[in-house]
């Protein structure tokens, strides 16, 4: 059941991440027209890439931020690179993690055929490795 929830969650995040929204004025000011303290002190972090070895494959991830984890999952013909601006925009309030699945982007290209079931197993293993208990 956990794998099914992660697949559904990943698909929702994929579609939500593809829609650009803005909840605050672009000037960096709040509704009152004044900058809030968090806007004055918290600067978005630029995503950094690293590799993680798990279950016989090396996956590449982009990360930014330190808050609650938010995992971005790319579609069939894309990579984690499509999420760079979202990772930066939501940090440091969220710990954004965009993964390149096996065979995509900077992750390892393997001789075996990948499928959704394999991606789910790797996503679960990744959340375990990163000590994420409740991914969003």
Image (spheres, rainbow, N blue to C red):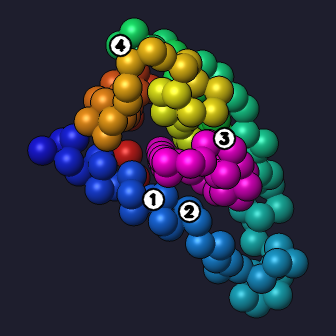
Q: CA distance from mark 4 to mark 2?
A: 27 Å
* Labels 3 & 4 near each other (Cβ < 8 A): no
Residue corresponding to mark 2: 17
Compare marks 3 and 4 and give the one earlier in the sequence: 4
Q: Residues within 10 Å of mark 2 (few under 14, many from 20)?
A: some
Q: Nearer the viewer, residue 58 or 36?
A: 58
Q: Which residue is mark 4?
A: 55
Which residue lies at the image location 59% right of the left edge and 72% below the top edge? 19
- 127 above or below 6? above
For label 1, the crowd category at 10 Å Cα-Cα, with few meaning under 14, some 14 to 19 and many 20 or more, is some
Callout 3: helix, strand or loop?
strand
Among the two numbered marks 4 and 1 on one chain, the one whose residue lies closer to the N terminus: 1
Q: Looking at the image, is 105 positioned above or below residue 98?
A: above
Q: Earlier in the sequence, mark 4 or mark 2?
A: 2
- Is residue 120 in sight in this rendering? no
Dot 1 and dot 2 residues touching (CB under 8 Å) = yes
Crowding around mark 3 (Cα neighbors within 10 Å: few <14, some 14 to 19, many 20+) is many
Image quadrant in which the N terminus is located: top left
Residue 116 seen in render: yes
Circles 2 and 3, Cβ within 8 Å, touching? The answer is no
The residue stretch that appears in magenta: 66-94
| Gap in angstroms between the C-alphas marked 1 and 2 | 6 Å
**Circle nearer the N terminus (1, 3):** 1
Which residue is drawn at the image coordinates 56% and 41% (left, top)?
A: 98
Which label number is shown at residue 64?
A: 3
Left or right of 24 in this view: 109: left
Sequence-first disc among 2 and 3: 2
Q: Residue, x 56% and y 33% (percent of image)?
A: 104
In whole angstroms, how far apart are the C-alphas of marks 4 and 1? 24 Å
Q: Position of residue 91 (x, y in %)?
A: 66, 51
Q: Residue tagged by mark 1?
A: 13
Number of numbered markers = 4
């Amino acid at each position: 059941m956990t794998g099914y929830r992660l697949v559904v969650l990943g698909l929702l995040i994929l579609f939500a991440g593809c829609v650009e929204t803005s909840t605050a004025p672009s000037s960096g000011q709040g509704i009152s027209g004044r900058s809030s303290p968090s806007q004055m002190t918290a600067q978005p972090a630029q995503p950094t890439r690293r590799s993680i070895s798990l279950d016989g494959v090396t996956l590449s991830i982009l990360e930014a931020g330190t808050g609650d984890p938010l995992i971005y999952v790319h579609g069939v013909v894309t990579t984690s690179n499509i999420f760079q601006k979202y990772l930066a925009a939501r940090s440091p309030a969220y710990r954004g993690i965009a993964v390149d699945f096996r065979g995509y982007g900077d992750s390892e290209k393997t001789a075996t055929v990948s499928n959704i079931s394999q991606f789910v197993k790797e996503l679960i293993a990744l959340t375990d490795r990163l000590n994420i208990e409740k991914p969003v």
